[in-house]
Amino acid sequence: MGKRVALLFPGQGSQYVGMGRELLAEFPLARMAFEEASDALGEDLMELCLEGPEEKLTLTANAQPAILTLSVAILRVVRQELDLEEVCAAGHSLGEYSALVAAGSLDLPSAVVAVRKRGEFMQEAVPAGQGSMAAILGLEAGEVDSLCQEMAGEEVVVAANYNGPGQVVISGHKSAVERVCQAARGRGAKKVVPLQVSAPFHSPLLAPAGEKLRKVLESIPFRDPAFPVISNVDAAPYPSKDSMVEILARQVSSPVRWEESMKVLSSMGVDMAVELGPKKVLVGLLKRIVPGLAAFQVEDKAGLRALEAALG
C-alpha cells in the first residue's frame, strides 16, 4: 500500500517574482501548463511569474491566475515523476480553484479565466483605501468574533480567515479594522499585523463581487470531482458539481474556515499532506492544526526529491 496523500494549494499572498523558475527550466510539462493558461488569458503568465515586476504580479487580478497556474504546473510534474495515491484536496481561498482543477472538476483554461475575473471583481468591489485586513495572533477565534461585533458600529468588520489556533484574519472597513486591532492589543493579542491587500476579502463587502463571479461561473462546465475537495465555505467536501457555482460565488464574501477544513482532511485517512505552490504557508498552518500529520511542500527539485524520499 502506498502513502495516502492530501493535496493542498496556497492562496493569494504566496506569489513572488521568480517563483517556479527551477521547475519551469527543467520540465516541459510545467511550461506547457503556462502556455495553456497564457493562451486562455491572451498574455504571457510565465514572463509575469519569472520577471515581474513585483507591483504587477501582486495585483489581485494577476496574482490569482499566476499562483493557480504554477500550482497546477507543479502538480503535473509531481504526477509525472511520482506515484501519488490522492485521497482529497483543499485550497486556501484562491487555492480552492487549484484543488478543483486537481480533482478534474475544472480545466485549467476555464479556471484561469474565472480567477482573473474573480480578482478583477474583488479589486473593484470596494474603492481603494476604504477596506483593509489584519492578522490577529494569540487570541482565540471566539474572542476575535466578539471584538468584531463590539467594534463594528455602523461599519463592517468580520473574521475572514480562521487559519489555525490563535491566528485569525479580520476584514472590513478600514477604520473598523483599526478599532478591532487596537482592542485586540488591549485584550492581550501577541501580535497584530496589517495585511498588504487591495480589498477587504472574505467580508460581506465583497458580496457584489460574488454575484458578478456567479455569472462567469455559470458559463463554465464543471464535473464531479475524482476525489473529495473540501470547500472553504462549509469546511466539508463539495456534494457534487451542481453545488460548485453556488459555493464558489459565496466563497468570495464568506470566511475561510481553514482550521476546520484541515481537521476534516486529517480525518479522511491521509498519511501526509503535500502543498503544491509557492512558499510554505499551508504546511506551517497544518503543523499547528494537526501536529502529527506529515507535511511537505513542492515548488522546486529539492521539494520534489524530499517528497519522493518520504513516499518511499
Image (tube, helix red, strand yellow):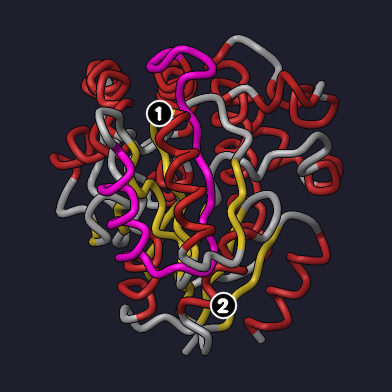
Q: Could you say which disc has been placed on residue 287 in the image?
A: 2
Residue 180 pos. (x, y %): 43, 47
Residue 153 sits in quarter? top left
The residue sitting at 30% across, 29% down in the picture is: 155
Residue 296 sits in quarter? bottom right
Q: Which residues are magenta?
A: 124-152
Residue 73 pos. (x, y %): 63, 43
Of 304 and 115, the residue lying toward us:
115
Q: Is 120 situated left or right of 52 in this image?
A: left
The residue sitting at 26% across, 26% down in the picture is: 207
Of 52 and 34, the residue lying toward us:
52
Residue 308 sits in quarter? bottom right
| 30 in magenta | no
Image height of 193 relative to 306, above or below? above
Q: Nearer the viewer, mark 2 or mark 1?
A: 1
Of 248 and 100, the residue lying toward us:
248
Residue 28 pos. (x, y %): 75, 40
Quick one: label 2, few (<14), some, or many (20+) residues within 10 Å? some
The residue sitting at 69% across, 42% down in the picture is: 29
Image height of 118 relative to 310, above or below? above
Q: Quadrant of the C terminus?
A: bottom right
Q: Could you say which disc has been placed on residue 226 in the image?
A: none
Mark 2–mark 1 distance (CA, rounded to whole Å): 32 Å
Residue 229 shows in the view:
no
| 149 in magenta | yes
Of 48 and 41, the residue lying toward us:
48
The residue sitting at 86% across, 41% down in the picture is: 25
Q: Is 71 situated left or right of 162 in this image?
A: right
Residue 107 shows in the view:
yes
Residue at image mark 1: 173
Q: Amino acid at mark 1?
A: His
